[in-house]
Image (cartoon, rainbow, N blue to C red):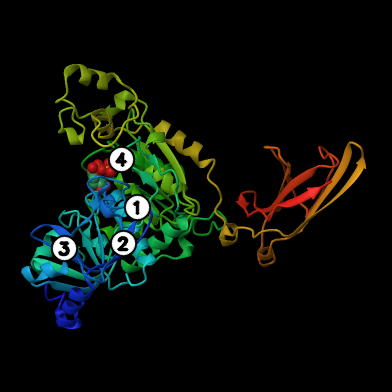
Amino acid sequence: QSQELSQARIDYHVALESLHQHGTQMVCTGKMHTDRICRFDYLCYCSDAEEFVFFHSNSSVMLPNLGSRRFQPALLDLSSVEDHNTQYFNFLELPVAALKFMPKPVFVPDVTLILNRFNPDNLMHVFHDDLLPAYYTMKQYSDLDDEARLVFMEGWSEGPHFDLYKLLSSKQPLLKEQLKNFGKLMCFTKSYVGLSKMTTWYQYGFVQPQGPKANILVSGNEIRQFAKTLMDKMNISRSEESDISAEDDKDKKEDYIVVFSRSTTRLILNEAELIMALAQEFQMRVVTVSLEEQSYPSIVQVISGAYMLVSMHGAQLITSLFLPKGAVVVELFPFAVNPEQYTPYKTLASLPGMDLHYISWKNNLEENTVTHPDRPWEQGGISHLEKAEQERILASKDVPRHLCCRNPEWLFRIYQDTLVDIPSFLDALKEGMKTKPILKKSKTATLVHPGRVREPQCQTSVQTTNEAKLTVSWQIPWNLKFLKVREVKYEVWIQEQGENTYMPYILPQQNYTFSENIKPFTTYLVWVRCIFNKNLLGPFADVLMCRT
Ligand code: UDP
């Protein structure tokens, strides 16, 4: 390992001189610790103290310079999970003069991204909290390229999905425990600390019950670009051809359904029967995959061509981000678990541009559930609880809303095994398929928003003492002439000056004369904007002041 960080590529004495002279330099983005990413020159790490160190010199820079607000509660979040108190980053400060009492620093020449993985044992967390955020953080800073070094500071070992993390760059990621192998004092020549939260869509329920994030900033496009890059790195070929479109039925017989099975917990007890039912209903091949039996690339290969993915609720469903456009995700929920309250995969499938059709099914028959009250609490056991509490949980038919992560009733219910009632499953499936939209190829045009309408104008005339007319006209947005748009409409808002309310109108043409509710000798404020295909709103043009 230390071979890899060979000092050959940097002149040790130049680096040491530079550290002494300039100290540490830090410049960050973000107003708050929750949206901050910092870039450092010569950020150091002391492995004995397990602390990052900022060396002050006459020319060091620390922006933002928060003073002791740096500890309220932290400089930044090291993981993509918002404001989690086990994931904070900070550093110690020392004068550069202290260096002469310290071990000789080892310099890391690579541009480094320093972060915490949130829960590297769980595939959903791996993708949602680590891989996607790291991928797009690297896109944000162009020197975090394929040669970048990732350093995981959460302190865990590699974990079962380390191969996935290795796909992010050509260099082996470093774990916290490995840092001491490089010496007592390590200095990162150039590093970035923190992760972008821009791509996350789900909050796990630390402060309010779990659910979609309030302000989702990612679309299916970015998720799919990421998936494509990962597949390229895994040498999985996939073309647009595999997108499921009802327009070409020619390779319908090639279509197949994937059942993603779990083999240790939250089982489907009649998987064979479920597979038979699916094959019969859709007249398709049904294949099963499981994390216990296949390599990750082979699972992705299978999923990336599937017509439908069927699985019990669980982390393995994150692989739906590799499904072709137009595919169907079917998520099964155990008894007493409300599908509307646990929606990480529904939210993913529903992101605009993901183009996945989501269907859920829940076991409503208590006789078809198999509970495990005697298991350890983290696998849903409840025998450690007081008798009355156990009885209350056993009698309840619906897990009430709760916070993460140790609610025993939730764990008890989510770790049940399920005998899937085939008739009710097929009913839910058939019902859900009724609303499956037809995927249209070449959809890029439907992502383009209108520009402002141009040259908006108004003309007014007074008819009688209580009648007036207001004519508003405008030119099409500049980008419209380059686009094929199915439907172009215009929205006009008319507000009488001084009033709080306005009258909205939707119009197909580029001018209109309003006479209803228009009063003489009155000033109206008029806004105009263009709308493509019912829901792609453009910006309003500058407001018009129209006096009758
Ligand atoms: N897992 C699996 N097979 C199983 C049970 C779990 O492959 O039978 C995987 C699962 O996909 C996840 C990890 O083990 O990556 C942790 O599973 P857990 O049930 O704790 O989490 P959940 O799936 O509910 O997020």
Q: Are marks 4 and 2 in contact (CB under 8 Å)?
A: no
Question: Within the displayed image, which quadrant is ligand 1 positioned in?
Answer: top left
Q: Which residue matches tag 4?
A: 271
- Of circles 3 and 2, the one toward us is 3
Residue in the foreground of this view, choosing between 310 and 281: 310
| Sequence-first disc among 4 and 2 | 2
Q: Which residue matches tag 2?
A: 38
Q: In the structure shown, which secondary structural element does the residue marked by tag 1 occupy?
A: helix
Q: In the structure shown, which secondary structural element does the residue marked by tag 4 occupy?
A: helix
Q: Which residue matches tag 1?
A: 319
- Residue 540 visible (yes or no): yes
Residue 249 in percent (x, y) is at 54, 56
Q: Are marks 3 and 4 in contact (CB under 8 Å)?
A: no
- Of circles 3 and 4, the one toward us is 3
Measure the C-alpha gap from mark 1 to mark 2.
31 Å
What's the residue type where badge 1 is placed? Thr
Q: Residues within 10 Å of mark 2 (few under 14, many from 20)?
A: many
Q: Residues within 10 Å of mark 3 (few under 14, many from 20)?
A: some
Residue in the foreground of this view, choosing between 373 and 434: 373
Measure the C-alpha gap from mark 1 to mark 4.
19 Å
| Sequence-first disc among 3 and 2 | 2
Residue 440 in which image quadrant: bottom right
Residue 263 in percent (x, y) is at 23, 43
